[in-house]
Image (spheres, rainbow, N blue to C red):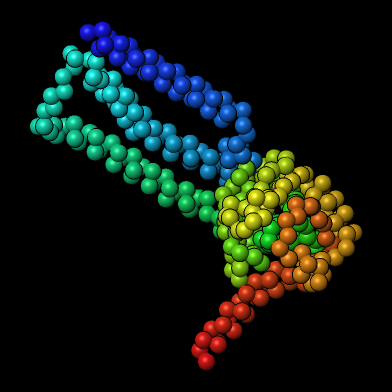
Amino acid sequence: MARAKKKQKQRRNLIIFGSGTGLLLFALAARYLYTTPMPVLQPAGPIAAGQKQLMITAFLLMLIIVVPVFILAFGFAWRYRESNTKAVYKPNWDHSRIIETIWWLIPTALIVLLAIMTWHGTFKYDPYKSLASSGQKELTVQVVALDWRWLFIYPEQKVASVNELRLPVNTPVKFEITADAPMNSFWIPQLGGQVYAMPGMGTTLHLKADRSGRFYGSSANISGQGFADMHFIAVATSDASFKNWVKDARQQPPLTKAGYDRLAQPQRNRAVITYGQPVDNLYGTIMSKYMNMDHAHMHMEGM
């Protein structure tokens, strides 16, 4: 009898210790999430704001299933614990059609609702869909992923920069994205979702910043030993400040073909560099280099 009481006391202490540890870990996790900035949940543009709302809505809908399951799991574990001799587990294997209909109908309805939301969001936040209203002009920025840096070319402004992206506020931006390195991914969490950068291919992404600030940008695809340092800063400023930056950039040395060849060499360098006149059609030259290689390879295979 004494041994049984001692064993029951040890089990109770273990439950109390486990519950306390769980609550402590939950409190620490909640504090970390509350105090740590999460760019995805701090949108600075219409695309990121819409994607945030979509994520939160989907998360809340999924909690309709997850929360009751956890409550029932802990409830059954507590009720039918070994020490509770009054609760005898005698299952009735006759199924209730009403109960089965409920627990199949609710998840099915949620899956259908999530599918509709995903379908609608896919078209609404299509990266190839322009954000420019009628008569509004877009800013075109050509993005090249290098080993392990980012090159931004402004074809209309005739300037370029490395590891720093300048954008005017409330101006729709069209990004033309490629790579002169292994496949990568271009991502500014506070402005919108990521889009892949691939050698010999061009992808498009439309974004807009609706407030000024400095926003973290990075690669979202592992591309080698320098991947951890492959991030940049997107600076959204007023239109006047952007024009002043362009004016100052035009005074910098031009980005020649030889200069680009040195820039494209694999190196871990996070320095911000600004160039004046880039070599003509540099973006097209980078893309065609891989296209020509593919064509030559196919030609050799054919022979």
Identify the residue at horizontal 18%, vertical 31% (top origin).
Answer: 99
**43 or 289, which is in the foreground?**
289
x and y percent of residue 58 in the render?
A: 43, 39
Residue 22, relative to residue 192: is it above or below? above
What count of labels does the image hold?
0
The answer to whether residue 174 of the structure is visible from this angle is no
Residue 301: x percent and y percent? Answer: 51, 86
Q: Is 114 left or right of 216, judged from the image as shown?
A: left
Residue furthest bottom in the image = 303
Which of 255/121 is in front?
Answer: 255
- Which residue corresponds to the image point at 83% horizontal and 60% vertical from the top-left? 275
Q: Is 22 situated above or below 261?
A: above
Task: Return the residue nearer the eye: 120 or 292.
Answer: 292
Quarter the N terminus occupies: top left
Location of residue 264 in the rendering, given as x and y in whole percent from the top left corner:
73, 65
Q: Quadrant of residue 108?
A: top left
Where is residue 113? Give x, y as percent: 36, 42
Residue 238 in the image: above or below residue 185: above
Residue situated furthest top in the rendering: 2
Residue positioned 26% across, 23% down in the render: 76
Q: Is residue 198 above or below residue 95?
A: below
Can residue 254 be seen at all in this image of the molecule?
Answer: yes
Corner quadrant of residue 31: top right
User: Of residues 210 and 77, which is closer to you in this image?
Assistant: 77
